[in-house]
Image (spheres, rainbow, N blue to C red):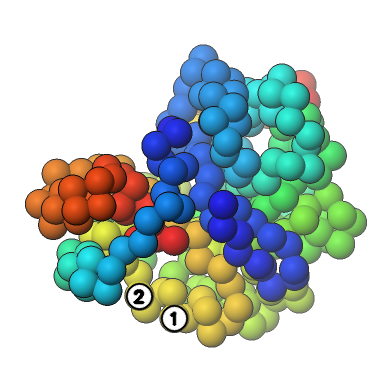
Amino acid sequence: MKYATLLNGVKMPMLGYGVYQVTKEECERCVLDALKVGYRSIDTAQSYFNEEEVGSAIEKSGIPRNEVFLTTKVWVENYGYEECKKSVKISLKKLKTDYIDLMLLHQPFADYYGAWRALEELYEEGKLRAIGISNFYPDRMVDIASFAKIRPMVNQVEVHPHNQQAGAKEWNEKYGLQLEAWAPFGEGRGSMFELPELRDIADKHNKTVAQVILRWHL
Amino acid sequence: MEENLNVFDFELTAEDMAEIAALDKNTSSFFSHTDPNIVEWFVKMVEERKKQQNSAEEKKSW
C-alpha cells in the first residue's frame, strides 16, 4: 500500500473502498469483504445513509480501529456551525467510534464556512484526525485555504481518465492540499472500461482496465 | 475488490501515461458545480431529503 502524508503529518492510504450508493442492506457485507481482502481505508458520508452499517462492519471485522482509516462527510443540510457540530457527534455514534480519520465538507454550498469552524474545533479537540473539503474547485479552494484558521488537508474531487484535473492538482498542490479522487473510474461512463487505449495497455501488462486506471491514479 | 488492491506490482511506462493523458476530455462526466441550474438542483435535493428522511426525528433519536 502507498500512503499520502497530509499537511498535518497524518498518513492516509492511497487506495480505499467507497460506499456511495451502497444500500443499507448491502453495506455491512461489502465493507466486511473489503476489510477482509485488505482494504484499510473506507469512505462514506452522512448523505449515503449507511454510516451505521460501516460502523458495524468495522466492529465485526475484528480489525483494530486504529488500523482503519475512516472518512465521512458533512452533508449540506447539516452546515452552519451548530448543526455541523451536532451532525459530527451523530456520525461518531453511528460509526461506533470516538474519532474520525478524515472529515470532509461534502459540497461547496450553503453555510460551509460556519461548518468549517465547527470542524476546526472538533479537530483541535482530537475527535477528527484530519479535516478537508470536497468538490471545491480551485477558486473556492484558494478562498477557504487562505481565509480559514486551519487549512483543509484534503480536497476530494472528480478525477478519472476523462476528467484528469491537471489544473486542480496544480492548484491544490500549491496550497498543500492532498487531492483525492471520487469516481476514480468515472463510474464507467463514456465506456471507460471498453476504451481500446486502456484495453491495450491492460493487455500489455496482463492486468485489467480497472487495475490500469488505479495504477494511473497512484 | 481483491483485483483492484493488486495494483502495486506493475508500473505504467511513459508511453502508457502519455496515451492515458490523451483521453482527457477536461470536463466532468457528471455535472459542474458552477452551473446555477445544478446549484438549484442541489437546493431542491437537500430540501427533498430533509422531508423524506424525516431528519428532525432521526436526529432526535440519535
Foreground of the two, A154 or A4? A4
Residue depicted at 44% across the width and 43% down the height: B6
Instruction: State the image quarter where residue A7 is shown.
Output: bottom right
In the rendered image, the vertical position of residue A165 relative to residue B6, given as above or below: below
| Chain name for mark 2 | A
From the viewer's perspective, tell me whether residue B47 is left or right of residue A127: left
- Residue A214 pos. (x, y %): 38, 52
Q: Amino acid at mark 1?
A: Glu
Q: Secondary structure at mark 1?
A: helix
Q: Which residue is mark 1?
A: A170
Q: Which mark is residue A54?
A: none
Residue depicted at 18% across the width and 68% down the height: B19
**How many other residues sit within 10 Å of disc 1, few (<14), some (14-19) or many (≥20)?**
some
Q: Secondary structure at mark 2?
A: helix
Foreground of the two, A144 or B39? A144
Q: Which residue is mark 2?
A: A166
From the viewer's perspective, tell me whether residue B14 is left or right of residue B56: left
- Residue A62 pos. (x, y %): 75, 24
Instruction: State the image quarter where residue B33 is shown.
Output: bottom left
Q: Are marks 1 and 2 in contact (CB under 8 Å)?
A: yes
- Residue B24 pos. (x, y %): 21, 67
Residue depicted at 67% across the width and 52% down the height: A103
Residue depicted at 46% across the width and 42% down the height: B5
Q: Amino acid at mark 2?
A: Ala
| Chain name for mark 1 | A
From the viewer's perspective, tell me whether residue A135 is left or right of residue A93: left
In the rendered image, the vertical position of residue B55 relative to residue A198, given as above or below: above
The quarter in which the C terminus of chain A is drawn is bottom left
